[in-house]
Image: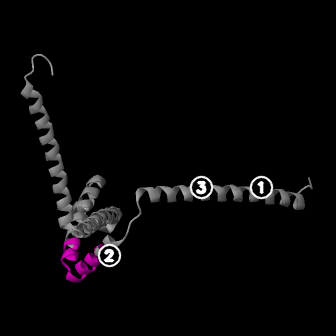
Amino acid sequence: MTQGEEPGAADAEGAEVQRAGEREDAEEAEEEVAATQLGTERYVLAGFFASGMLLAYLLGKVIHGVWATLSNKDWFSRTLPAVSAVGDDDKATYGMVVGGVIALIVVLRAFRNAELRTWSDEVASELAKVKWPTKKEVTNSTFVVIATTTVATLYLALLDRFWAFVTNIVYGDGS
């Protein structure tokens, strides 16, 4: 405490720091509660979201590719001149938008399908029962795999050199 500070100022700062820590703890607890409330459903939702994003990307690329190929055909240019005159960058953009809309419709229909939803919920609940390895176990296993691979590589390299030497003696000049 310095000369100009009052004795209660240090207590007020300490109380403020304590309140800030309590707020952070409360926010972390809320995040845990939100994750716990969703339970295994968060995996199902993440799976549907990832599937939708992948489907949108793939459909966008396919639509763009088909559109670009058809635009180079004479019969397509004569039949639909406005569609074939669209620039290549715009075709990619429009293809992604159309692919995204189609993917959204497909994913929403799949998400609302009771049989598929039941199956995906069961898969997520089974995955939640799995005992996943700890970081230490994964690190140890990775080290073992790398060490074993290195030893096997060195062994095979030595065998290769040995048999190259033997082959050279048999088929070579004999030295």
Residue at image mark 3: 147
CB atoms of marks 3 and 1 within 8 Å: no
Per the rendered image, the range of residues in magenta is: 106-124
> What type of secondary structure mainly makes up the magenta span?
helix
**Residue 124 at x, y = what percent?**
29, 73
Residue 110 inside the magenta-drawn segment: yes
Which amino acid type is marked by label 1?
A: Arg
Residue 125: which quarter of the image? Answer: bottom left
Residue in front for this viewpoint, 43 or 114:
43
Dot 1: element: helix
Amino acid at circle 3: Ala
Answer with mark 2 or mark 3, whichever residue precedes in sequence: 2
- Which picture quadrant has residue 46? bottom left
C-alpha gap between disc 2 and disc 3? 33 Å
Q: Amino acid at mark 2?
A: Glu
Res. 8 mark: none
Q: CA distance from mark 3 to mark 1?
A: 21 Å
Residue that mark 2 sits on: 126
Task: Say whether residue 103 is left or right of residue 133.
Answer: left
Residue at position x 24%, y 62% in the image: 83
Q: Which mark is residue 161?
A: 1
**Residue 19 within the magenta-colored segment of the rendering:** no
